[in-house]
Amino acid sequence: MDVVGPLERGLTVLRAMSAPGGHRMRPSELARATGLARSTVDRVLATLVHLGHLRETDREVELAPPLMEPGNAYLTGCGVPDALGPVAERLADEFDESVSIAVPDGDGVRFVTQITRRRTMSLAFRIGDLLPAERCAPGALFAAEWDETARAAWLERRDSPERFPAVPARPAASAEEFDRRVARAAADGWSADDQLIEPGLVAVAVPVRGPDGRTACAVSVASHTSRHTAASLAEATLPRLRAETSAMEEALARSLAERAGTSRTAATEGAGGTAANAVGADPARTAKRELGPEFLQSLARGLTVMCALDGPRPLTAVAEATGLARATARRALLTLEHLGYVERTGHDFRLLPRVLELGYAHLSSLGFAEIVQPHMADLVRRTRESASMAVLDGDDIRYVARVPTYSIMSVDITLGTRFPAYATSMGRVLLADLPHSERAALLAGTALRPITERTVTDPAELAEIVDGVAERGHAFVDEELEAGLRSLAVPVRDGTGRVVAALNVATHAARGPVEETLAALLPPLTETAARIEADLRVVTRRKRLRLP
Ligand code: PHB
């Protein structure tokens, strides 16, 4: 088999960085962890940093949200989260317990949806986490469909806890005991986990079949022994789970039929703005020209191919969607198939759940502040001014992230600080996004006090300023909040275009003329907001992100 070496080595590096504690590493550590030559590691890293999948921080590299794109493509293509997510949400509300959906992944069980209602549990699994089949409720359901080869593979690997860092290690399970649970699951059509993962954690799972009649996924309800025994959890939830099963199977079949029917362009559109998923053009070629031998074109192309597989696609469709030559796309697909990330059925290639092992679990658990912080730090390095992010809270703005500059003259503000929205650049950006009537009502209910002698307090003048902000897309406030303080802000939008926060840089009036300050600060500020928005789009594709 003619494997594409750079692609294989790139994925090796990404796997090493997806191991527990590996999301931030030095190149030398990566060379040690992967057994690859340092020069190879450097080229892989230069490529992945260029693509935005990794980020450089001091002398380390770390996983970055755009790396979630292959996983997002898999989650879209497999149809499960889209079809069953809403039902899982409803069940979690009804039971007031955690509900999750997992798919079979070799002899493991991989989570694709998590609706958590964690209370006394110490463990919370993330989308992408892999569990050993013998240690969880869905595993027995999946194992009921294993053939001899699959069972033999499972027997052989039972003693490799390093493959399952998401669960606390335990002595290997007895094969007989697991066989008994598998037989019972097959006979009963459901399966229980009575503290197989950790003391206190109990779960019940039912299978959901795909159109091919095989178990496509399992829906689990997880609880704690302080509320339920495994038996009482089954009693409380099985009737409802069973009542929903045929509706879930129909929804899944519909979702898969839709995926298979979507046109190639529609399927790859809107996946975010990074080079890895541009449609119809090969961005690797431009990067190669820029970076020369440090850029591994075939690694970049392999990742592009993954992102294009958000459903089963024949080779021609993949080549067309990625702008790659057929032979190039074919080599990438065959390498990915060989490495266990892609499966071929007839003419169609599709992603396997294993792509989620590439950093997905770590990245999907990042909070808002962790996503925005590195971009704001970069903005501060570029502008040498402090950067902040705020949300609207009543008629105030509230700081949700902040990176101060090192200058002794910097303004000191902590998280949670509030200022009146009308007198701040971030506030005006946030007001500008409100529907006209809401904005007017909010301002009408706010006492516009002069905070400095420059504060605009005339309602009509302020309304006009905010209209201007809505038009221009940025707000500049010159000494209206504090003498000597200037601030420039732009909106940060989520995937739906709604403004979720405002980003600003604050500077001193002494820095120079207003025009020069604007010319120096607006471009980096706008670029930073765009990068943050791109990350937010990828992360919120499959998960709601709570603002601080
Ligand atoms: C969970 O969703 O947290 C879960 C699912 C199945 C188990 C245990 C936990 O067996």
Image (cartoon, rainbow, N blue to C red):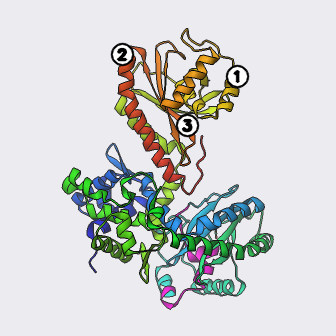
Whether 320 is drawn above or below 56: the answer is below
Q: Nearer the viewer, mark 3 or mark 1?
A: 1
x%, y% of residue 494? 54, 45
Residue 446, quarter of picture: top right
Amino acid on which disc 1 is placed: Ala
Residue labelled with disc 1: 444
Coordinates of residue 161 in the picture (x, y in percent): 49, 71
Neighbor class of circle 1 (other Cα within 10 Å; few <14, some 14-19, many 20+) is: few
Above or below, comparing residue 506 to residue 203 in the picture: above
Classify residue 283 by image quadrant: bottom left
Is tag 1's residue or tag 2's residue first in the polypeptide sequence? 1
Q: In the rendered view, does 111 fall on the left or right side of 387?
A: right
Amino acid residing under circle 3:
Ala
In space, the residues marked 3 and 1 are separated at their CA atoms by 22 Å
Q: Amino acid at mark 2?
A: Gly
* Magenta-drawn segment: 127-150
Pointer 2 residue = 512
* Mark 2, other Cα within 10 Å: few <14 / some 14–19 / many ≥20: few
Q: Residue at x 46, y 43 (%)?
A: 532
Query: What residue lies at 37% left-to-right and 17% top-to-bottom?
Result: 511
Instruction: Identify the residue at the far left of this view.
Output: 293
Nearer to us in this view, 280 or 332: 280
Q: Secondary structure at mark 1?
A: helix
Lower position in the chain sequence, tag 2 or tag 3: 3
Does the magenta segment cover residue 138? yes
Q: Position of residue 93 (x, y in %)?
A: 74, 58
Dot 3 or dot 1, earlier in sequence: 1
Q: Quadrant of ligand 1?
A: bottom right
- Judged left or right of residue 95, residue 7 is left
Question: Label 3: which residue?
Answer: 501
Residue 408 horizontal/vertical position (percent):
40, 20
Q: In what quadrant of the picture does the C terminus appear?
A: top right
